[in-house]
Structures are given as C-alpha cells and as structure tokens.
Amino acid sequence: MKFKIIDIQEDTNLNCYSVLTVVSIRDFIEFIQPIHEQKGNLDEQREVLQTRSAKIIRNQMVEDLKEGGILPPIVLGIIYDSKKIKKINEDNFFSLIENKLNNKEEKENIITILDGMQRIQALKDAMRKCNINHNLRVEFWFAQDEGDLLYRMLVLNSGQIPWGIDKQLEVVFRPILQKLKYRIPHLDNLISQKLYKQSEIVELFLAFTSRKVRIDKKQQLAEYHAALDIMSLIREKSGHIIDKFETIFVLMTDIDQLLSEIEDRYVFNNQTVRVGFMVACAEKTFGLLGSNLEKDHTQVEDNFNNIVFKLKKLRSKIQFQDRHNFLALNILKENLRSIPKEKHRQAFLDGFKVIFSEPEINSFAVCWHKMY
C-alpha cells in the first residue's frame, strides 16, 4: 500500500471519518484495478460522458496532466463495522483497505468511487499518451451505513447537473443492491434475464426517496431539487429509509413473480407500474411532500408497518385466488387507452393508493377505476 496519510478527521455530523492521502498516479491506477474486476468497473457503473463539452474538458485535463498539472482529490467510499472498529486511525487504515480489496466473499460494500469518475478516465487517457507519475490526492470516506455514504455522495455530486442522479447513485447504490440480492436469491437471475435492470432499481429507489413519479433527466433544475429532496430524507434518517425500500422492493418482486405466468400482463413487469407503486408506498409511509410527516418517526413506523401488513395480505390474496380475475386486465387496458402515456406513472400512483385506503381488495379493478 503506497498511500501516504496526510490527515484524518472525524465527521461528527455523519459519524464518518475522512482520511486524506497522497499517492502516485501510477500506483493509484494499479490500486483501483481490483475494484474494476469486482464489477466496480467505471464503464459498467457509469458511462463516460461523450458530449462535446465533456470531451473538451477531459482532453484539457489530459493536457494539464502531461504538463504536470494537479487534479482535485478523488473521493472513495467505504462502509466499515463500527462495532468492531471504534475509530479509524493510521494503525487500522491500511488493514481495512487491504481487507476490502482482498475479501471477495464479503457481502458488504467494496470500495466505491464517490467523486472523480471523469478524472479517473482522464488519468487513464493521459497514461496511455505519456509517462506521468506525479502525485494524486485521494480522500477515503469511512461510513457506518449506506445512508451516510449515500448522503456524502449526493453532497459531493449534486451540483454536477449534467450527470444524471440515477447514474451518480449507481456507484453508492451497490451495497443496497448487494443486500437485495442476498434477500432475493433469484434477483441475479431476474437481472440476467433483463426482467430487472440495475438502473431501473436505482430509479425505483429515487422514486421512493423523492416521492416523485418522474425525475426528468432533461430538466437539470428538476434533478437538482430531486437531489435536495433525497438528501433531506436521508439526513433525517426517516426511520431507516433504505431498509424500508428494501422491504417493499422484496414484497413487490414476490407479487411480480406470482403473476409471472400471465402473458401480456403489464402489471409489475413494467417500470411505469413499478414506479407508481413505489411512490404510492412512499407517500403512505412518509406523507405527501411538504407535509413534514417524515419527521414524526413514530407515525412513519406505524404507517410503514400498516403498509407491510397490507402488502403481505395482498400477496396472499393473489396467491390463492384466480390471478387473471384479480388482475382485471380488461379494465386496466380500457382505462389506459383514455390516459395520455406521459400520465401513466401518475395514474398508477393514484390507483395503487387504493391498496392502503381500503380495508382489503379482492381485485385490482378497484385500483384501475381510480387511475383518473
């Protein structure tokens, strides 16, 4: 390990540790290679921007590096077990890093890139063109849970408007996805069959945390405010929001699989439907945006427990009833024809709210009739 520690500070706001280091560019590129091999590959996690302005900036970074230019620090994130390790210091820093790199069986988070994707690409481009080996500053953020790491990542990147928030989140979302795969053994198979995409799961998380059916990637201002909404929820903790998302996602996939034999069903095998469902669950849990209900943790817990109870009841109903009749696809298709496509997510949000307003439902028909 050829990192030289410059400074270690504790962030008492987030209960995190910041370790600022310096390392040669060549050693850093060698260091991150194992991360790439563990599906932390830059191209897989987040595409390198190919816009004209992005290429100009990246090419300028390469030229600067060739002339001995210094880049801003690259920021990496790591989740550590605070029960085993009370404090990050010079004595345990290197062993923690080596453990994260070498322990391929570890179910928790590997080292992730919180800030610096473009710079890493520029470093690779520069190394192919010339011999550069001056030093680079690398900051390691050690967090106790995914929420704190996610918050740190959003703070670092929310101002970079041209980057889609969902792409920013894919990097830090990795530990959440790993936990989902652990809770849903067949999720890997669903992803490999392209029934679920990682980017779509990230979008569902965005929908759940922001309580918005659409984050328009073309509207930069909307992205920025979505980031603020998500940071606010995560910062407030909101009764372990990540755990709640995972629980609802598991129940949604259970229902999806129960319906999997029905062809042309549209329901839950379509991202439009899934987003509407997730936002309905989020609104019932945390209240409408602006209501500040999310700050009442006792009420949030009560709401969430009620949601889980009703979704489990719904799952049981679908399991033991005629699934074709329960879906009421003829009513759904007829109603969708009269609703503009751009309004479908909102329509499903309105429809799925019925699940939580009624004592019980015996058919999705009652949901479809509330779609407009």
Image (cartoon, rainbow, N blue to C red):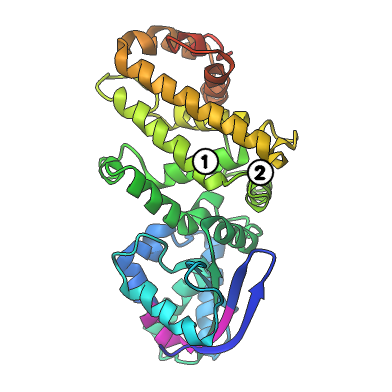
Residue closest to the eye, 331 or 222: 331
Label 1 Cα crowd, 10 Å radius (few <14 / some 14-19 / many 20+): many
Q: Quadrant of residue 323?
A: top left
Residue holding disc 2: 222
Quarter of the image containing the N terminus?
bottom left
User: Which label sits on residue 39?
Assistant: none
- Residue 301 image position (x, y, % from top left): 60, 36
- Residue 74 image position (x, y, % from top left): 54, 75
Q: Which residues are magenta?
A: 19-31
User: Which label sits on residue 244?
Assistant: 1
Going 66% across and 53% down the picture, which residue do you hit?
Answer: 235
- Say what secondary structure mark 2 lies in: helix
Going 54% across and 90% down the picture, which residue do you hit?
Answer: 67
Asked if residue 28 is among those painted magenta in the image, a careful observer would answer: yes
Mark 1 and mark 2 in contact (Cβ < 8 Å)? no
Going 58% across and 82% down the picture, which residue do you hit?
Answer: 20
Residue type, label 2: Ala
**Above or below, 79 relative to 93:** above
For marks 2 and 1, give the CA distance: 25 Å
Residue 140 horizontal side relative to residue 268, left or right: right
Residue type, label 1: Lys
**Do we see residue 217 in this rendering?**
yes
Residue closest to the eye, 110 or 117: 110
Residue closest to the eye, 337 or 158: 158
Quarter of the image containing the C terminus?
top right
